[in-house]
Amino acid sequence: MKVFYKRRHPDNFEKQKTEALYVNNFGYYKDIEKEIRIERAEGRYDYQLIYVSNGEMLVGKSILKSGDYCLFYPDEPQFYTYRCAEGSSYYWIHFTGNA
């Protein structure tokens, strides 16, 4: 299976629909010094998977702890907060595809 990575750009949006798996963006936060609050009432056009490696994260009214993850579907509202704490780490990926 092919895996592509590129930040979303208008000229590659149609290509994302033709690939089995298309990674739009990914990254991590480690030892953040202040909370990071994300509010996307309209959601995003792609899937987003967030893994709490260490620490806590607030998703809606739920608290995720180390080892937990959440998956947001396309166009699903997203309201979450990465909590700051020594040793906290979070990994995330945005992806699309047709498989």
Image (cartoon, rainbow, N blue to C red):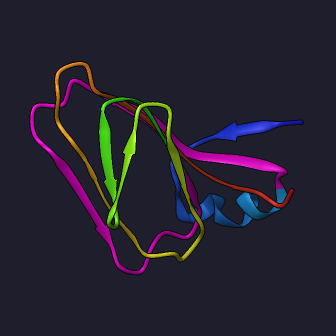
Quarter that holds the N terminus: top right
Query: Where 69 sits versus 41, above or below?
Result: above
- Does residue 94 appear to the left or right of 97 in the view shown? left
Quarter that holds the C terminus: bottom right
Instruction: Name the image quarter holding residue 5.
Output: top right
Which residue is outermost to the top? 87
- Does residue 41 appear to the left or right of 9 in the view shown? left
- Does residue 92 appear to the left or right of 4 in the view shown? left
Which residue is outermost to the bottom? 42
Query: Where 58 sits versus 91, above or below?
Result: below
Nearest the camera: 46 or 36? 36
Q: Position of residue 57 (x, y in %)?
A: 32, 46
Q: Position of residue 58 (x, y in %)?
A: 30, 54
Q: Position of residue 43 (x, y in %)?
A: 45, 73
Residue at 60 percent of width and 67 percent of height: 73
Residue at 76 percent of width and 57 percent of height: 97
Q: Is residue 4 magenta?
A: no
Instruction: Name the image quarter holding residue 80.
Output: bottom left
Residue at 54 percent of width and 77 percent of height: 75
Residue stretch in magenta: 19-48
| Count of number-bearing discs | 0
Q: Is residue 28 magenta?
A: yes
Residue at 15 percent of width and 45 percent of height: 35
Nearest the camera: 64 or 70? 64
Q: Position of residue 79 (x, y in %)?
A: 33, 67
